[in-house]
Image (cartoon, rainbow, N blue to C red):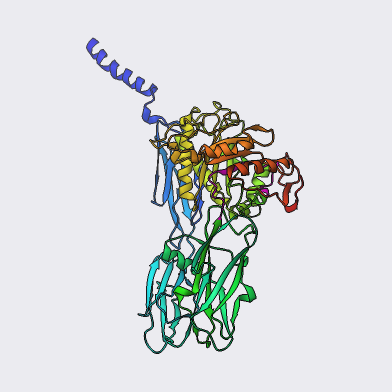
Amino acid sequence: MRKSFKFWICPIISVLVAACTETPEDTVNTLTVTPDHALEFMAKDNEAVRLNVETDAAKWEYSASEKWITISAGEKSLSVNVTDNPETKVRVGRLTITAGNAEPVAINVSQDAAEEVVPFLSVTPSEPISFSAEAGEVTALTVDTNVEEWDYKVPDWLTAEKQEGQLLLTTQANEGTISRVGRVDISAEGAKPVRINVSQEAPDLESVKASLTNAQGSHSGELVIANLNTLELPLTVNLDKSLRNDTQLDIVYDKDYVAAYNLINKTDYQAYPEHLVTIPSEGTVTMSAGENSKEFTVEINPDDINSLHNGVTYLIPVIVKPKAGTGVTAPMAEARVNYTISHKCKKDVKNVVYIDTKDTNPLNFLELRLEDGSMMVDAVVLFAANINWDGRNQEVILNNNGCTQGLLDQTETYIQPLRKAGIKVLLGLLGNHDGAGIANLSEYGAIEYSKTLANAVKKYKLDGISFDDEYSNYGQLSGEWFESASAENASRLLYYTKESMKEIVPWDTYTMVYYYGNINSSLPRFNGVAPGNYVDIAVADYPIKKAAPMSGMTKKQCSGGSVEMNLGSGSSPSDAINIKNSGYGWMMWFSYNPVKKPDNVAALQTAAKGLYDGMKLMTPQYVYKKATMGTHNNDFDPNPYPFAW
C-alpha cells in the first residue's frame, strides 16, 4: 500500500505543477508597427519612409516580397524605400514584420508606373550644311536623345568622330570639278531619324581667297580682362588678290563652333555671351575694288554680370564668310580667329561669407565685383538651418526658421542668380538647443540624416552643407538615432553627408566645417579615410583665426583668417596679404550686411588689395534689402536700391 500510494501521488503532483506553471510557448508576444497602413511610392525619386517597431520579443525580423523594395533596419525602426520603377505598369509587393509568436504585421507596398518613355532624337544644327571645297572644315553636331545608343552615316568625303552627345564632321578636299552633295543620317532606336543635307562646293581655281587675322597676324589670341572697360579687338580681312568690284563679306560670331573647338583641342571652354560681342556694320565688311585688306574692330563688353564667371575660360570665335556669287572663298583654316578670354585675377585666395538670414539679402553679393569683373565672393553660407529632434515622428530633421526657409522656397529669385554668377551657395547647419547635434548621431542616424541633407541640397539647388557644432544640448536624448557626442561621430556624419550628396545630387557639392565644439583640425579619420577627403573647406573661430589643415588636407582648403564684420573681432581685413603669402586658400567673413553697415564694403576693399595684388573692389551701385532685419520674417526684397556710404 505504501509503495502504491507513492507511485500515484507523484503524477498527481506533476499535473498540478504543470497546470499552475505557464510555459514559454504559452506567452503571446506583442508587435506594433507605426504607421501600419499601406505604403505608396512615386515611380522615381522617392524619400524613405520610416516605420517604428515596438515589441517585447527578444528579436524581430522583416522580409520583403520583392527585390525592388529596399529596407535598412535600426534598433527599433525600418527605413523603407523603393528603387525607381522602369516599367510602365504599377507594381505591388508586401513587407512583413515578425516578432516571436506575435501576429505578423503585413504592410502592402505599391509604386506608381513609370511614365511611358517616347524615344526622341534631336540634332543641332539640323538645317542643311554647306562646306567649302577645302579640307579640314569642321562642324560639330550636338545629339540629344533619351535612347541609350545612337548611330550615324556620313558621305565618304566627310570623316566623323563620335563623342558623348556630339558628332564631329570634318571635310576632305574636293579635288573634282563639280560640287558634291550627300546626307548625314543620325538614328536612335524607336526615334524618328534626323537627316541633314550636306554639300561641298567645287574648287574654284580662279577664286579670290579670303582670310581673317588679328593685329598680330595670327588666327588665335588670348584676352585677359584687367578692368570693366570695353575691349577693342582689331581684326583684318585679307584677300590673296584684289577684286574688280566692291564686294561684301560677312563677319560672324560663330558661337556654334565652340563645341567643335573643344572636341578638337580637348578643352572645356564656354561660349562668351553673344550679346556682349559687337561686330560693326551689323556684321558686314565691304571690300572696295582694288583692296587687298580691310581692318575693322570687334568690341567685347565685360561689364555684365553674366560675362565672366570665376575660374571659367571663354572662347570668342569669329569667322569671315563670303557671300554666294562673289567669287570669294574662305578656307576654314585661314578664315577664323579664336580668342580665349578670362580674368586677370586668378584668385589664389577665395572668400567665403556667412550671412545671417535674419538680416541680409543674398543678392547683395552680385554687387561685389573686382576691377576685372570677377566676383569678390566665391562662396556664401546661409546661416543657418538647424538640426533638431522631432519627437512626434521620432526622427532627426532639418529645421528652418521663416527667413531661411523663405530664401530656399524662392531659390530662383535669391539663390540661383548667385550660382549663375559663379558663387557657390551652401546651407549652414547649426544645433538648436535640444538633444540632437552634429556630433552625437549613431551610425544609423548619420546615414539617415545625411540623406535628408543631400535631398535638401538637390531640392533647393544648393552647392553643399556647412557644419557648425554649437548650441546642441548633448546628453538629453538616447535611442537608435544617438550616441554620446564625440569627434568620431562628427567625422562620421561629415563622411556620410559627402557620400550621400555624391549619390543624390547630380552636380559637384561641398562640405565645409567651422572649427568649434567637436570639430577641429584633429578630426579623426572615418573608416580609415582622412577627413581631408570628405571635408572640402575648413574655417576657424575668431579667436583662433587660422584653420590648421586636417589630416589629408592642405592649406588651400583652409581659411587663413576669420573676420566678424558685425562686431569687428577676429582677423583684420589688412591681414589679407599675409594670408595670401602664407599659402591659405580661403578667407572667411561673417555677418556681411551693406544695408546696416556700409563700411563692410570698405573692409572687403582693403582685403581685395592684399589678396589680389592691388586689385580694386568696385563700390556697389546698389543694395538689396530685408524689410524687417533681425526677425525670422520672410520679407526679402528683390528690388535694387542705391548704395550709400
Residue 347 part of the magenta segment: yes
Residue 448 part of the magenta segment: no
Q: Is residue 415 visible from the viewing direction of this image?
A: yes
Q: Quick one: quadrant of the N terminus?
A: top left
Q: Percent position (x, y) of residue 619?
A: 70, 49
Q: Quick one: quadrant of the C terminus?
A: top right
Q: Percent position (x, y) of residue 549?
A: 48, 35
289 or 310, nearer to the observer: 289
382 or 160, nearer to the observer: 160
Q: Percent position (x, y) of residue 631?
A: 72, 40
Position of 642 compared to 507: left or right? right
Q: Is residue 145 visible from the viewing direction of this image?
A: no
Q: Residue shown at 61%/50% (left/top)?
A: 375
Q: Percent position (x, y) of residue 637?
A: 73, 50
Magenta stretch?
343-364
Residue 203 lies in what quarter of the image?
bottom left
Q: Is 457 rendered above or below residue 563?
A: below
Position of 624 compared to 180: left or right? right
Position of 174 compared to 286: left or right? left
Q: Is 457 rendered above or below residue 222?
A: above
317 or 18, nearer to the observer: 317
32 or 259, nearer to the observer: 259
